[in-house]
Image (tube, rainbow, N blue to C red):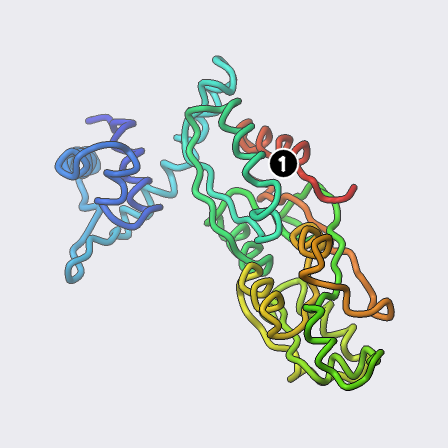
Amino acid sequence: MKRFNLQALETLCSIARLGTFNAAAQHLNATQPAISARIKELESAARVPLFSKQGRRMVLTIQGRKLVQMAEPLLQSLDDALVALGGLDTATGVVRMGVGEIAALSWLPDMMKQAKAVMPNVSYEIEVDITVHMRHRLESGDIDLAIVAAPLVLNEIKAVPLGTVDMVWVIAPGLIDQLPQSRPAVSDILHAYPIWSLPKSSAIYPIALNILRQFDIPAQALHTYDNLQGIIKLVLNQSGASLLPRILIQDYLDSGSLTTLSPAMPEPELEFAIAWNAGREQPVLKKIIDIAAECSTFKR
């Protein structure tokens, strides 16, 4: 019986994960003909086609998908064995992470610097997303780790707390100055200008909406934008008010570019955690979780 080549199996799994032969070639630092040759070798050993052509695309056959499902745990187990024998500095592979924008814009660079120093041969695929999407992707196995707004109440998902973020209602001082009242009430300010938030599926939106209801502000007054940096720029440019993480806007508050909306507005805390699928607890992931907990600048 002809044996499977581990390099060819790794190539197959890379194509399945990245979507194309070309993307796998770039990721594995190989030529596209070399990638194609490895797949042909696998097909010869398996005695079945692993890909079929659909238009201009090559897609996995049923047998190809089955082989990927069987090969991925095997390759991961081999990586774990090598790590156990040689230490984390010998670890290889790709870690797929989902990260919330607040972490991405604050302490994530320090975390990645430290992770790279400890595991120099591990590669990362990081996507910035909102918690609800990352939760689904963790469950399906599309990502290995996620830094999310907590808590996640799911049996198959484990999480380690990373701290809390203070949220604060802010506005550009010039907008308050434009109102006819010398000391406008908070409800007057909220009725006068747009209010911005991340989308409805985010962790921030329902918190903002519940607070606004206390001031008789209707839901349709809450505009959404799926980018925190974009919302900050809108508020700085006098395009409305928003509930924003203090960790990202403290410098603007200190400089006077932004001001808190009103002492009457509640300033909630948003909890964060790093989460992973309970079935995937490899040494590399455990180390990244430890580094995230160490590097987080969220309030403990």
Query: Badge 1 local density, few (<14 within 10 Å), some, or many (20+)?
Result: many
Q: Where is residue 85 in the image (x, y as percent from the top left)?
A: 49, 13
Q: Position of residue 239 (x, y in %)?
A: 60, 74
Q: Is residue 13 visible?
A: yes
Q: Which of 30 and 247 is in front in this view?
A: 247
Q: Nearer the viewer, residue 109 or 276?
A: 109
In which quadrant of the rendered image does the N terminus lie?
top left
Q: Nearer the viewer, residue 96 or 68?
A: 96
Amino acid type shown at disc 1: Ala
Q: In this view, which residue lies farthest toward the right? A: 264
Residue at 56% across / 47% down in the picture? 104
Q: Where is residue 277 in the image (x, y as percent from the top left)?
A: 58, 44
Give the residue pinned by disc 1: 292
**Does 90 appear above or below 148?**
above
Label 1: which secondary element: helix
Residue at 25% across / 49% down in the picture? 20
In which quadrant of the rendered image does the C terminus lie?
top right
Q: In this view, which residue lies farthest toward the top? A: 86
- Left/right of residue 52 with respect to residue 6 in the rendered view: left
Q: How many numbered marks appear?
A: 1
Q: Where is residue 293 in the image (x, y as percent from the top left)?
A: 67, 35
Q: In which quarter of the image is residue 106?
A: top right
Residue at 86% across / 67% down in the picture? 263
Q: In which quarter of the image is residue 78?
A: top left
**Does 197 appear above or below 27?**
below
Q: Which of 184 and 27 is in front in this view?
A: 184
Q: Can residue 151 be seen in this view?
A: no
